[in-house]
Amino acid sequence: MKFEARKYQQDTVDALWEASQKPCHPVIAVPTGAGKTVIMGLFIKRYLNTYPNNKVTVLSHTQDIISQDHDALARIFPKKTIGLYSAGLGAKYIHQVTVAGIQSIYRKPELFKWTNLFIIDEAHTINHKNVGMYRSLLDDHPAMKVGMSATVFRSGHGYIYEGEALFDTLAYDLTSIENFNKLVSDGYLTNLISISTKLQLNTRGVKKSAGDYNIKALGTKFDRDKITAQAVLEVIKYGKNYKKWLIFAIDTKHADNICAELIKGGIDAEVLHSKMSANREFITRGFKSGSIRCLISVGMVTTGFDAPNVDLIVLLRPTMSSALHVQMVGRGLRVADGKSHCLVLDFSGNTTRLGPINDVKIPNKKGKGTGEAPTKVCPECNVINYASARKCSICGYEFPFKIKLSAEASKAEIIRKNREKREAKIEWRNVSNVRYQLYKKSGNPNSVLVLYECGLSLVKEWVHSNRDGWLKRKADHWAYYRGYIGSVITAESLVQAAAHLKVPKRIKVDYNDKYPNIVGFEF
């Protein structure tokens, strides 16, 4: 099977190759769903083309990731036997390229003493101190080490390529704001829309241990019938138009209680946790195939879980770990047919506490906090936005501008050199009626022209349901926010469903541009 590298994947491989030519141990940051195994395979292919007699070992710590990496490399190298060394998977054979579980080999360094290149998948799991299975095997090994992860940082340390860490160079960062947003806009990752739910789990006073909330303390405070019932009601309310739900719970008892409440509400749900063995594969297969709508996870699907059709993430597991936060939410990033976005219902406050996953709060060393996460909640639609946002990214609500007064002498110019901008004209208009028309323009896909009757005047809005990328995702959220029922949204289907859409009581209109722009709604 021939793999065609996307430009960003080839750019990553080029940067990693350039770094590998220097005396360093580089790491790359690759978001979930961006094709990490493809990048890995392309890099290995380039490495072996240059050094045809060298040996490569790919390491990871979970059976799911080991199995996925092995299958991916077998497809990329169809004429080469890929080794597999994992006691848990019942295989112990070594070839020029081998995928291995660290638990199975760290006490057997002699078997891999001829390895020239180690690639560590989920490299953030390596201890930044000189302890642990990875460090025991790799610290004194002369081979080059390359790391890959969606989260290149660790609690209590910070970035995994700084300080006493195994890695020392960040070769390429696809998780940066600019690169991440481009992957979303280009359609390689699914857009995430995070909602601040009515129910919020207040973690004030919860005991902490090992840099995160204590699991037992979380369960004692939040695993209660009333809280679970209220949360499930909200999940069912928001999730009715979403096909595949993934819920993160605190512990197994909490997961079982959530599952029971969902089944009571008519939702096909199952629990997945570490204490299961026989039914685990059956449940995972059922969830991916569609027979199970909702999966409640306890620490089982944060890494190495590939289910692209997940379009609803529910966070009922509060955490202080930025890595865990990114890994949980990242399960919704993969693209799939018919999936325009992934909704994140954040009961846990993780997004507010730790930030958006492409601008997450990085955990520094102890005693060196980074302050509050850069977010704020839109009062109109409850979507979580960047703290610096002027308008809500979904409904267009304009956040009020706050002036911060300072006691220090100002350096502002005493006489303004430029003409003052005219005062912004933004006002609320009562809506008496809404009309919908199919708008056709030569050379462009059809869109929906929405006409708001406000007294004697009309305010126009265009909804681009037949477009691609961000315009399409914004249009889909616009439709679902108004109660649209259906799995496929087009301009034509929206016009047909017009009589069933919610009508706003009033709209907030910005008259400062050439044409009036709607920046807020009240229903």
Image: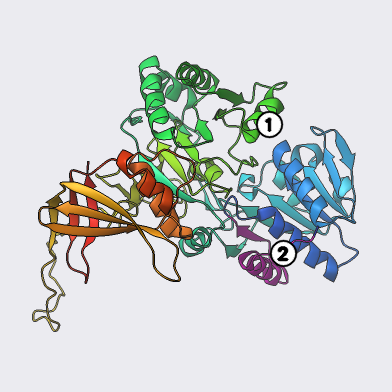
The answer to whether residue 185 is seen in the rendering is: yes
Q: Is residue 502 above or below residue 364?
A: above
Residues rendered magenta in the picture: 2-30
- Counting labels gives 2
Residue situated in front as seen by the camera: 486 or 495: 495
Task: Residue at 50%, 23% (x, y): give it.
Answer: 267
Quick one: SS at disc 1? helix
Q: Earlier in the sequence, mark 2 or mark 1?
A: 2
Give neighbour class at mark 1: few <14, some 14-19, many 20+ (Cα, 10 Å): some
Residue at the image position 64 percent from the left and 57 percent from the top? 167
Q: What amino acid is labelled 2 in the image?
A: Glu
> Is residue 277 positioned above or below 300 on the image?
above
Instruction: Judge the density around disc 2: few (<14), some (14-19), many (≥20) Cα neighbours within 10 Å.
Output: few
Q: Nearer the viewer, residue 449 or 159?
A: 449
Q: Amino acid at mark 1?
A: Arg
Q: Position of residue 382 (x, y in %)?
A: 31, 42
Q: Name the side, left or right, on which 387 lies relative to 414.
A: right
Question: Residue lying farthest bottom?
Answer: 417
Q: In the shown orientation, is residue 161 left or right of residue 398? A: right
Which residue is labeled 1 in the image? 285
Q: Which mark, residue 4? A: 2
- Residue 372 appears in the picture as rendered: no
